[in-house]
Image (spheres, rainbow, N blue to C red):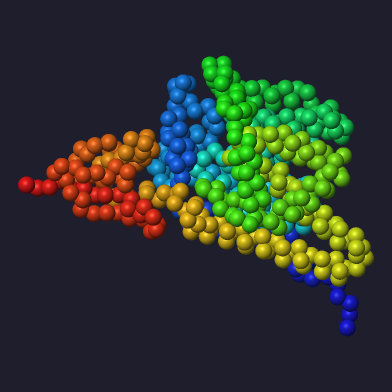
């Protein structure tokens, strides 16, 4: 019997095609589930985001919601073209998350060996955290999108000579737009600090064409002119952009929240965002990755990850709701952890191909468990967890098509006005104006000369009575 040549087997020769094909299938499945299936509704934060986006008027500078302006422009365009629905509110996040996922895959492929890139990509795109922000109709996805884009284009500028001018302009444009998002400045500062401190990065910068850099910076400056004007008019915006709170935080509460978000493995839960941030297996790999980056701190990417992570720590302590900003550095540390795990195994068996392949089996099993548990945790958690599911409303799906007048409570008025503005099927009022009208649960009341003819319910256990259809009593 001849000796088995692993390198000649079909699976081995096509392992990367199989791996990236699997990533593509999982990615498509996750976005379909996130966009259409779970959590199946919108949160109060998404409603507020839709209201802010609707109020944006490029012809009236004072009306601009300057914080996260690029996202609000995308969301306004989505609602203007397709009307207001749960899907159109989430559509900008889904699009940005798709590009972010592709960026993560490419970046991990460039920073690490292909096998490590495949495994880390699979874990990253199937974490409950990423799937949630991928469908969350708020600007939270921008923390991931800007980070990935800036790192990827910085890497392309450093390593690729072809199309370098295009990469420089793209990087500066993205850097300029990212400044509209709070805390994004620290990503840029981390890259600048790494360039100044790392000799190889300094050498690369010195080789770049100075006129091309100036042209690229001009593009960035043009894009941030509205931001500069807004800061001049309202200097307090600087505090928001820098992530500095206007009130002193409750330190004990913040530390307890951070503990639950990153290390609450024994008691998972949450409100609109499920905790913990990563599962236990992923966090162990992240710890391995952090140790690896400390040992290889002379490497350029270790410099960037270290300065970036250190600069973010004070701000997540000040505001634990900003955990999205740590997603990308933690994914990079996770990839480093997988690399460390495999490297240690290969050191034990440097020449035995069977042992080296055998070492991949437990790692592969670990990745499969993390992938499926992450997806299952997201789907079931956001649909059935009693502390999370009630925070998402699917009321927009329940409004009858023939509705002409919707009566709402005062705190619901702004959002339903946005729905009426773009859908143009009904009017929204605080008191009835038609013989037949639909009242929200919060606007239900006993009204003289009207009676309830129908109650519209949702499939949720509590507060399932969502709308009341009133008809005028004929005397």
Q: Tell me the residue at 68%/63% (across/down).
A: 368
Kindly give the residue lying farthest to the top in the view shown: 232
Q: In which quarter of the image is the N terminus?
A: bottom right
Kindly give the residue lying farthest to the left in the view shown: 475
Residue 239 image-quadrant placement:
top right
Kindly give the residue lying farthest to the right in the view shown: 351
Q: Tell me the residue at 53%/36% (across/down).
A: 71
Q: Can the viewer see residue 119?
A: yes
Indicate whether 118 appears above or below 9: above
365 or 459: nearer the eye?
459
86 or 414: nearer the eye?
414
Q: Tell me the residue at 77%/57% (across/down).
A: 115
Q: Position of residue 286 (x, y in %)?
A: 74, 50
Q: In this view, does 158 lie to the left or right of 139?
A: right
Q: Where is residue 395 in the image (x, y as percent from the top left)?
A: 37, 49
Residue 161 image-quadrant placement:
top right
Indicate whether 229 appears above or below 244: above
262 or 309: nearer the eye?
262
Q: Position of residue 22 (x, y in %)?
A: 65, 61
Q: Tell me the residue at 61%/44% (across/down).
A: 257
Q: Where is residue 456 in the image (x, y as percent from the top left)?
A: 30, 54
């Amino acid at each position: 019997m001849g000796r088995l040549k692993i390198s000649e087997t079909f699976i081995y020769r096509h392992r990367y095609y199989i791996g990236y094909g699997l990533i593509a299938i999982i990615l498509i499945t996750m976005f379909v589930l996130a966009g259409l299936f779970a959590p199946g509704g919108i949160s109060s934060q998404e409603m507020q985001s839709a209201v802010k986006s609707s109020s944006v008027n490029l012809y009236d500078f004072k009306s601009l919601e300057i914080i996260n302006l690029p996202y609000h422009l995308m969301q306004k365009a989505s609602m203007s073209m397709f009307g207001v629905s749960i899907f159109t509110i989430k559509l900008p996040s889904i699009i940005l998350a798709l590009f972010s996922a592709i960026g993560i895959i490419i970046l991990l492929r460039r920073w690490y060996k292909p096998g490590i890139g495949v495994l880390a990509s699979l874990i990253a795109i199937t974490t409950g955290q990423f799937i949630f922000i991928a469908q969350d109709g708020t600007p939270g996805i921008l923390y991931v999108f800007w980070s990935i884009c800036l790192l990827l284009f910085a890497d392309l500028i450093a390593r690729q000579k072809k199309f370098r001018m295009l990469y420089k302009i793209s990087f500066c444009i993205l850097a300029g737009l990212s400044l509209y998002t709070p805390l994004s400045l620290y990503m840029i500062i981390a890259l600048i600090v790494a360039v100044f401190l790392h000799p190889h990065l300094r050498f690369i910068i010195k080789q770049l064409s100075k006129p091309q850099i100036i042209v690229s910076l001009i593009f960035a400056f043009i894009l941030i002119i509205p931001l500069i004007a807004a800061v001049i008019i309202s200097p307090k915006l600087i505090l928001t952009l820098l992530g500095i709170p206007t009130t002193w935080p409750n330190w004990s509460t913040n530390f307890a929240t951070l503990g639950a978000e990153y290390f609450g493995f024994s008691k998972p839960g949450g409100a609109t965002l499920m905790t913990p941030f990563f599962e236990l297996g992923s966090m162990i790999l992240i710890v391995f990755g952090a140790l690896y980056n400390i040992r290889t701190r002379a490497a350029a990417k270790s410099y960037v990850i270290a300065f970036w992570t250190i600069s973010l720590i004070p701000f997540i302590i000040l505001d634990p709701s900003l955990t999205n900003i740590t997603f990308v550095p933690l994914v990079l540390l996770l990839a480093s952890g997988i690399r460390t795990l495999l490297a240690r195994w290969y050191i034990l068996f440097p020449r035995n191909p069977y042992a080296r392949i055998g070492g991949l089996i437990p790692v592969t099993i670990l990745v499969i468990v993390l992938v499926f548990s992450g997806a299952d945790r997201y789907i079931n958690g956001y649909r059935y967890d009693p502390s999370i599911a009630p925070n998402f409303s699917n009321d927009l799906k329940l409004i009858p098509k023939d509705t002409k007048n919707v009566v709402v409570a005062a705190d619901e008025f702004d959002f339903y006005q946005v729905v009426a503005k773009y859908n143009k099927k009904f009017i929204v009022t605080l008191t009835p104006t038609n013989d037949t009208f639909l009242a929200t649960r919060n606007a239900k009341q006993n009204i003289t000369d009207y009676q309830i003819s129908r109650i519209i319910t949702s499939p949720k256990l509590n507060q399932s009575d969502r709308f009341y259809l009133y008809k005028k009593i004929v005397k």
